[in-house]
Image (cartoon, rainbow, N blue to C red):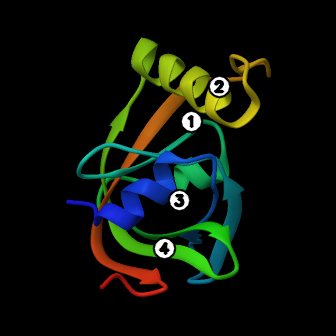
Amino acid sequence: MLKDKVAALAGGPNYAVLTTPLGDGTANSHMMWVGADADHLLINTEIHRRKFRNMPVGAKVTVVVFENPFAWAEVRGTVVEHVGGTEARAHIDALAQKYTGADYSMEVQSERVIVKIRPDVQFTFPPAS
């Protein structure tokens, strides 16, 4: 389950940095839109992108969601599911509405997919009381 502060930050129009492992053990980071349900952080991407290939089910990833340099949350977690189809398309439109006020307008090159990340460790700053 997500901590309340993590869910609030991910639910707002705050950006996230997603860090995934590359095959040689180095890290690959991307600025992302982020969402959440009660139990997971939700990242929406396309299946042809490197970040998706870095996140098979079982992969360990880190997501830092920030409102500003003095209000942020870090989640170290495990990818537990990929969700595609109409649900993923609706999700990217909802994220675009949250961040831009309009549906997603970029061309989809392959297929949209939601990556569900279960938190293993959660940190917030300032620390939750």
Q: Which residue is mark 4?
A: 73
Question: Which mark's residue is nearer the viewer, 1 or 4?
Answer: 4
Q: Amino acid at mark 1?
A: Ile
User: Which residue is labeled 2 in the image?
Assistant: 97
33 w.r.t. 30: above or below: above
* Up-down relation of residue 90 to residue 8 (above or below): above
Percent from the top left, x then y, of residue 7?
Answer: 38, 56
Q: Residue tagged by mark 1?
A: 47
> In the image, is 116 to the left or to the right of 93?
left
Closer to the N terminus: mark 3 or mark 4? 3
Nearer to us of marks 1 and 2 is: 2
Mark 4 or mark 2, earlier in chain: 4
Give the residue pinned by disc 3: 54
In depth, the one of 48 and 5 nearer the eye is 5
Q: Residue at x 31, y 62 (%)?
A: 4
Q: In terms of sequence position, does the residue under pointer 1 or pointer 4 come before the other?
A: 1
Which tag, 3 or 2, sits closer to the chain's start?
Answer: 3
